[in-house]
Every structure is written in structure tokens, then in C-alpha cells.
Image (spheres, rainbow, N blue to C red):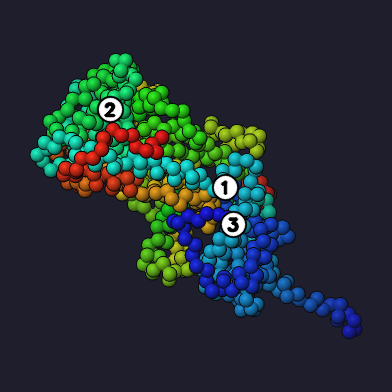
Amino acid sequence: MMSRNSMYTNPKPCKHLADYKLRHGLSGYNLLQEQIRTTPSGKSSVKNHQTEIPRCCFCNGYQKRLYLCLICSSISCSSHTLLHSQCENGHDIAVDIERSELYCVLCCDQVYDPDFDKIVMLKHLMDLPRSGNGVDVSAGRRSSKRRRLCSALELDLKKTKQLVSMRDLRAKSCYPLGLRGLNNLGSTCFMNSVLQALLHAPPFRNYFLTGQRNHEVCRKRSSDRLCLLCDIYVFFSAVFSGDRTPYSPAQLLYSWWQHSANLASYEQQDAHEFFISVLDGIHENGVKARSPIKDTGECHCVAHRVFSGQLRSDVTCMSCGYTSTTYDPFMDISLNLDTGNCPSTDLANKSLKPSDNTYVSTLLGCLDLFTKPEKLGSDQKFFCENCQERQDSVKQMSIKRLPLVLCLHIKRFEHFPVRRMSRKIDRYMQFPFCLDMNPYLSSSVVRNRFGNRMFAFEGDELDTSTEFEIFAVVTHSGTLDSGHYVTYLHLKDQWYKCDDAWITAVEEEVVRASQCYMLFYAQKMLYYKANEDLVCQPVSPRADPFLPIAGCC
Amino acid sequence: MSLRNSVNRPPTPDAVEDQEKEPTLQEIINIKMIESGEKEKLMELLRERLVECGWKDEMKALCRAYIKKKGTNNVTVDDLVHVITPKGRASIPDSIKTELLLRIRAFLASAAL
């Protein structure tokens, strides 16, 4: 039994299709199944053995769209389908031979039947080379998905509310809690900008504020060694204390230097590199402290629980259609800017000259580029298991599992190792505040490969939320060598500019016009819950906030 | 005499034969290309090129605009085909036409037609 994806509700059959189904059921479909052939690129056609060239039985034409009657198998071209239906009563449903799609002659329109699509897809899957065909028909791992979401909510904030009450509420301004300037300790804006984003990543923030990180009993600290997690905890406490004077995250900087010795200097570093390295540091610290990894094989350190997702990579042999699928985890996604340039010539009707580039890059465009099928060059021929030789192939990326917080990194720094130079790409990129990641999921991408069938691939996840809200933007201005990072935070419907020690409220137009470098999106539900707790009003104090949350793994 | 007449009389025309005139050169080429599998290859190539240069996306956008104008429930596939076919044919880049023509010419040469 295939699960239904809520995004794709099956269209209601027309009266004629319903009648046909009543009278003939699946017999017509089943008879047809044998004749369906699918190309390696995923296109399914009806190929009759007897006649090589299908022709319309009325006009003998073969150049228009041809339709095969499901009842009597006679072929008519698009001009003569109605004629056939008039000649033979009840012969209203046909199949487009070229595309294997249902057509209702009386409605003059394409119609949809999940039963039909299922039969087409099953034939396709049967014909594909065994194993690694790129489509997993089994139901998805829904149980683990539910567990992940629940644990995310647990990281959530009953305790945060209590913590708010215990904090010093000296804040004179009505800025939300957790807004505090960070002093620049010598070209450390790369660190400050990422820290501001991390401070407000909902489950990440809650983890450190609710004392799940029990630093009192941290073994490292007790033996006077550096512990990155403890330093982060101290950092969070300081920022959320209510004190508005700019804070110097010196201890954290020192701690991070210990971890990433190669990046320890007073030179400007790359914010993205810092982000990855901090998460790596948290993971390493966390892994030792925690109990062994559970059944799913996923890491349960806070960095992974919050930021990690899974990418799917499909490499398809262009000769036989065999697809090799691999899954890799990710903590963030690096995107190339979409420039709107196509490899071959521009469209005939476009009056744009090559220099007249008015194409605006957008985040969705970059994501489209990321999930676009890419022809692998002749020097990268893939060894096809089925053909047993190197073949031309096509690669396509998609997102198998979304994280709770999605970090999107825009590749603005181009490095040319041969010429030994690097440059920055200043191109403006438009980004949305609300992001629906559904078209980039593996289920959507794989579905589209086969022409939009009503068929559940990969056990389409029903309870996965694909809607995200932006909460932080790290921007870069200037050149590669001398630039400056600034973070914009989106808290409670207001944008704040965090420029090292200076925090100011700004209009959203400013943010939209900025040159984004890293974008942080949180799952919508988590974002809204997190914003509820940023009120500055005192809450009646309750039990010890350091009480471990039940069910926390 | 009557016997000779019946011998000289042309055979009763068959219904099918009536429709089937002398196949044109275009038809012969087409049939040869289908039989050899070349047509399928050229179709794949054409699809690839049309996607690469953004033609497919443009057609998609035209369809969406038309559907939006008419309303989702008032449009059939046949409508869409009728509406975008002329625009589609007109906007194929010359480079693609040239490439395909060269391929067909090469095929003809190899098939000694």
C-alpha cells in the first residue's frame, strides 16, 4: 500500500474515466503493461512489437500525437480520437503512446489515475537493472523522523521560560533577550557574526540555556582543561543575562583556537569555515561525554541534532538507466550562485546581449541549480555496474532529510589554484524570508524524473515539515582580503543589525538589499515557538532549571 | 474478347492502396530514421538541447501564464498544445536547428539515400 503525499492530492477522475474503471477495472492497464518501455532518462512510451511505426487508423498519419484506445487498441491521431469514440461506443479512454499518459477523448484532456501510474512505474522498475535502481519503493523511515521531531520539541523550552525569570532583567530597552553586542578582538567579526546566528538557532539556543549541558559536572573543566562546550554555555549565559553592554568572547575564541590550531591567528578568517569548525568542535567534545550512539546510527550531539541533514546523490548511466544512489550527511549546504547563463546560445527571441546581464540571482535559483541533473564530463565517466564499463552519466543531488536548522552557504569566494589567485563574487542574490524546501527533497526530485506520476517514491514523508523561516543572515562586505561580516537577526518580527558591538533595529528592506553570505533558516514551528519565549516580562520562578529534561537522550 | 478486357482491366483498387500514394522523400527518410533508431536518438538530443537553453522553462512559464489567465479548471491539454505550439516553433534557437539538420544530413549520407 503506497503512502500518499499530502502535497500531491490525486485529481478526481472525470465521469468517463470513472465509467471506464467501473466497467473494465484494471484489465486494460494490465494488458498495456507489457508494451511499456522506459528510456534511461525516465521517459515511458508504449512500443508495440508488431508495427514499428504506429499510424492513425483513419488517416494513416504518424506525425501528430497518437493515442492508443484502451479497449480495442486501435490507434488514432489527435485529430481523429473523437471519430473513434463516435464509431465505437464507450471507447473514451486512451493512452498517449509517446508519453504513457491517460487521455479522455470526450474531455479532450489528460486524466490521472494512480492505478495506471502504478502499473507504468512497476513495469519501469521491473525493467531497470537490478539493485541500485535509484527508487526505493519501501515505506520511508517515518518512525525515526517522528522521533527526531519529538526530541527537537523536547529541546524546546518549558525550561527556557523558567530561566528567563532567574535572569537579571536590567534591560532598559525593549529589545528581546539574547541581543548583545560582541566586541571585536582583532578581525574577529567572522566569529562574532556566526556566534550571533548560533545564539538564536532555536533548538541550539535552548540546549545551552536550559542547562542540558551540565557544566558543573563537566569532567574536562574539573581537571582544568579546556572544554569548548562549557565555554559556549558560559557564552550563552552571558549573552542572555540581560546585561546589554558589549561582551568579549575571549575565552571562547581561545578555546576555539585550541581546537582549530591551523586557524588560530589574528587574520581575518572565513565565517563559514569558522561555523564548520565550531560545529566540529562541539561534536568532538560531545561524543566523548555522551553515551554510545543509538540504533539509527545518527550522532546525538547537539550540533548534529540541530544542523545535520542527509543528501542524496544519484548517478545514472545514460546507456542502460542503472542508477547508483549514495547518501551523505551534511551540516550545511554550499550553493553556487545561479547566473542564468546557459551553456548553449540564448533563446532566439531574447534581445539581451551577453554583456547586458539583467538576470537576478535568487536563492531558489541556486537551489534549482543544486538539484539540477548534471552531465558528468567525459573525463568523469562512471563505471556502470550493469554495463560493466565506463559510461557517460548524469548526476543529480537532492535532500533526503532536512535538518531542524538549515544553513545555506553562498559560495562567494572563488579560488583558482592554478593561477594562484582568489576573488570574491559580489553579485547580488535575492533570498526569501519564508522558504519551502519541498521541491528540493529527494521525493520531489525523484518523482519529477519520471514525469510527474501519481506514485509514492521513497515513502513520501507525511509528517515532515518543509517550511522554514529565516532567523539570521550573515553578510559580507568588502573584498576578499579586507572585508567585514555583519549579521542580521530576525526576532519577533523585527530585524536587528549586529555589527560587532553595535546592535540596531533595522527595516527589512535593508536586510533584503544586503549581500548575503550565509543564510540560517529554522523549521517554521520551532522558529515561532522560540520567538514566544523572548519576552522580557518576568515569569514566576519554578523548580531548578538545571533539572535534566526527561526523555532527553 | 471479354476475357482480354478483364485481363486488361486494372485490379480492383484496395481501400488502403487508395490512401497510400507514392511515399514522399520526407516519409521515406522518416521511416528509415525510425527503423534504424536514429530518430529516437535525435529526439533525445533535441530534448536535451531545449532544456539546456531554457526553452523548456519558457514554455512552462507560458503554460502557467495561460492557465492563470483562464483558470485551472478551464484548460485542457489540447488547449495548451494549440496555444504554445506556434510560439514554441518560432522560438527554437537557430543553433539547435543547424545541429539537428547536420545530424540528419550525416545520417542520409551514411544510409546512402
**Is the Cβ of the residue at disc 1 closer than 8 Å to that at disc 3?**
no
Q: Is residue A374 visible?
A: no
Spatial CA distance of label 1 from label 3 is 14 Å
Spatial CA distance of label 2 from label 1 is 42 Å
Q: Quadrant of the N terminus of chain B?
A: bottom right
Task: Out of A250 and B10, give the one closest to the viewer.
Answer: A250
Mark 2 crowdedness (10 Å alpha carbons): few <14, some 14-19, many ≥20: many
Residue A62, given in percent of the width and then of the height, sits at: 62, 64
The residue singled out by tag 3 in the image is: A118
State which quadrant residue A302 falls in: top left
The residue singled out by tag 1 in the image is: A138
Q: Residue furthest left?
A: A172
The kind of residue tagged 3 is: Lys
At 39% from the left edge and 48% from the top edge, which residue is drawn?
A466
> Vertical placement of A489 versus A350: above or below?
above
Residue at disc 1, secondary structure? loop
The kind of residue tagged 1 is: Ser
Of mark 1 and mark 3, the one earlier in the sequence is 3
Q: Quick check: A212 left or right of B103?
A: left
Q: Quick check: A64 left or right of A464?
A: right
> Vertical placement of A411 versus B11: above or below?
above
Spatial CA distance of label 3 from label 2 is 52 Å
Task: Out of A150 and A327, give the one closest to the viewer.
Answer: A150
Of mark 2 and mark 1, the one earlier in the sequence is 1
Residue B64, given in percent of the width and then of the height, sits at: 40, 61
Q: Chain of mark 1?
A: A
The residue singled out by tag 2 in the image is: A232
